[in-house]
């Protein structure tokens, strides 16, 4: 798997098989040290009636979109993965884009969140989401958590992104310099873009449009998300 391309992934099966053999590129116990960024973004998607999530409502729609990685901005990041694989343990080939360049990066889903949480203010939140960790040859090191959260008292539905990250060791000096200059800017831009995209797609589905689903690109069950 090359670290940089000018064209889209042409052999996703081979690349995904290679990713399946990779290990984490960092030690999770070291993420509080120097050089690590800790990020958190909360973005309101919609408002439902107070109480449990409304069947077919914004929370359920958002959960389905997040499950399928249909919230990303494909001009910044897309993903290839086995659509029939369980979410937990799913290996994903992320393809980051910067101008005309494409950067393939492997991640693995490590946790699925499905719970109700008590808040400090006495209210409760219904939460669903998942997280991934970075694998070898990724430009970054760390973990990213995506959660769809409904406050059952206020009805507010939010998308919450929590991340811890650091620049990985990048052998190519040109890529290393580019990441040093533009990496943090692109990362923050990505957070804002996916939150806005998820809000837009939830709104569209609530308005009657079909829910987008990953596009089958083969072979087998390999899909690409977000769909065009």
Image (cartoon, rainbow, N blue to C red):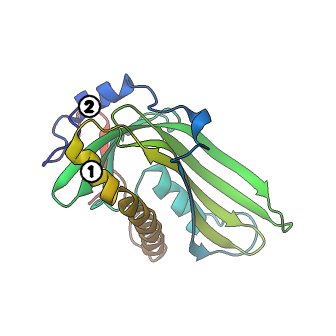
Q: Which residue is mark 2?
A: 15
Label 2, secondary structure: give it. helix
> Residue farthest to the right?
122
Residue visible at 26% across and 60% down? 228
The quadrant holding residue 226 is bottom left
**Circle 1: is it few (<14), some (14-19), or many (20+) Cα within 10 Å?**
few
Inspect this view and state whether residue 225 appears.
Answer: no
> Residue farthest to the left?
6
Residue visible at 84% across and 68% down? 121
Q: Position of residue 149 (x, y in %)?
A: 64, 62
Inspect this view and state whether residue 116 appears.
Answer: yes
In the image, residue 135 sits, relative to residue 119, either above or below, namely above
Q: Position of residue 196 (x, y in %)?
A: 44, 71
Between 136 and 119, the residue placed more toward the observer is 136
Label 2 close to label 1 by CB (< 8 Å): no
Upstream in the sequence, badge 2 or badge 1?
Answer: 2
Q: Which residue is mark 1?
A: 177
> Residue farthest to the top?
21
Q: Which mark is residue 59?
A: none
Q: CA distance from mark 2 to mark 1?
A: 25 Å
Q: Position of residue 24 (x, y in %)?
A: 46, 30
In the image, residue 212 sits, relative to residue 90, either above or below, namely below
The quadrant holding residue 153 is bottom right
Residue visible at 62% across and 69% down? 157
In the image, residue 204 sits, relative to residue 184, either above or below, namely below
């Amino acid at each position: 798997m090359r670290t940089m391309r000018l064209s889209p992934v042409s052999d996703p099966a081979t690349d995904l098989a290679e990713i399946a053999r990779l290990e984490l590129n960092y030690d999770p116990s070291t993420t509080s040290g120097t050089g690590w960024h800790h990020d958190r973004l909360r973005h309101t998607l919609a408002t439902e009636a107070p109480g449990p999530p409304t069947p077919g409502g914004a929370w359920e729609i958002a959960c389905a979109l997040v499950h399928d990685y249909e919230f990303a901005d494909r001009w910044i990041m897309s993903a290839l993965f086995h659509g029939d694989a369980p979410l937990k343990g799913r290996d994903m080939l992320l393809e980051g884009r910067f101008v005309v360049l494409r950067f393939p990066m492997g991640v693995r889903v490590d946790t699925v969140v499905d719970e109700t949480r008590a808040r400090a203010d006495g209210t409760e939140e219904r939460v669903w989401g998942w997280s991934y960790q970075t694998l070898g040859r990724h430009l970054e090191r760390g973990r990213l958590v995506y959660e769809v959260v409904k406050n059952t008292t206020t009805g507010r539905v939010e998308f919450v992104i929590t991340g811890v990250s650091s620049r990985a060791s990048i052998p190519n000096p040109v890529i290393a310099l580019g990441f040093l200059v533009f990496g943090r800017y692109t990362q923050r831009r990505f957070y804002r873009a996916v939150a806005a995209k998820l809000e837009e797609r939830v709104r569209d589905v609530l308005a009657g449009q079909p829910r987008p689903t990953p596009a089958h690109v083969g072979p087998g069950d390999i899909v690409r998300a977000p769909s065009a």
